[in-house]
Image (cartoon, grey):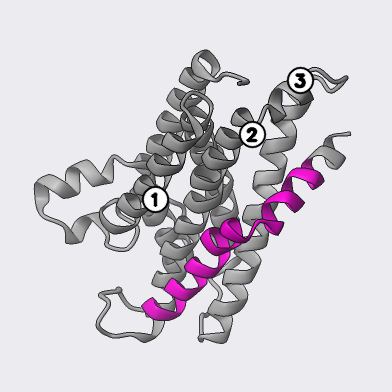
Amino acid sequence: MLLAQARTEAVLTLRNGEQVLLTVLIPVALLVAMSLMAVIPVPEPRVASATARVLALAVISSAFTGQAIALGFDRRYGVLKRLAATALPRWLLVAGRVTAGLAVVAVQVVIIAVVALLLGWDLPPATGLLWTAALLLLGSLSFGALGVLLGGALRAEIVLALANIAWFALLLVGGVALGADTLPTWLGVIVAALPSAALAEGLHTTLVDGAAPGLAQVFVLLIWGAAAAALATRTTRLG
């Protein structure tokens, strides 16, 4: 039942044109631009650095923005109430959404990795790839909790606006497109405490250096994810 529920959720996401634009087309376009256009400041090696930051953006797009918008509109149209009234237990609904979100992230990672390889990306050592997988899982769960927190409490129209604004803000000044160390000192300190910067910098370490991410970056993701999950359990409504 879990696999069937997860497959249904994942297929619905991947069939949505807006979701495909947000989760696949924009990240791939940014990967190509950041890898090939010298006017965009990207540390060397360019393709590896761009791949790390675009993977972070892909996780934010699907686990946070896509999840929040989908949940907001599911609540508006009464989808969750109808599902809750069926024989499906609530844990299965939640587990199905989480599994579907991880499946979408896996599809994004494969597509972005193939494009990066075509652009000349050299794979890191196996250790780096294992740490990358662990960090993507942690980032997906943390941003997924943030997405549920936003989409589970507010009206769908407000969720749509806030989720898209947050996506642009995290991309431009949240440590994704530009590293926290390239920003003014006071702003860099704030940005380094955001989960977007922690995920992007952690992936840069695992993919470019082939090493384990910093403990500070892991703690930032854990704290944001735990806090969002705790708040979401109190504020999330079915309708």
* Residue 82 to residue 204: above or below: above
* Residue 116 to residue 55: above or below: below
Whole-percent x, y for residue 93 in the image: 74, 28
Whole-percent x, y for residue 71 in the image: 59, 35
User: How many angstroms separate mark 3 from mark 2 (CA)?
Assistant: 12 Å
Q: Earlier in the sequence, mark 2 or mark 1?
A: 2
Is there any visible trace of residue 127 in the rendered image? no
Please check the rendered image and state whether residue 14 is part of the magenta-colored stretch, yes or no: yes
Q: Which kind of residue does numbered mark 1 sit on?
A: Trp
Give the residue number, with chain letter if any, for mark 2. 74
Q: Nearer the viewer, residue 79 or 55?
A: 79
- Determine the residue positioned at 55% across, 17% down: 233
Q: Which mark is residue 167?
A: 1
Q: Secondary structure at mark 2?
A: helix
Q: Which kind of residue does numbered mark 2 sit on?
A: Asp
User: For residue 49, what is the image quadrant?
Assistant: bottom left
Q: Secondary structure at mark 1?
A: helix
On screen, residue 88 versus residue 168, left or right, reads right
- Determine the residue positioned at 46% across, 37% down: 157
- Determine the residue positioned at 41% across, 29% down: 223
Give the residue number, with chain letter if any, for mark 3. 84
The stretch of residues the image draws in magenta is 6-34
* Residue 34 to residue 182: above or below: below
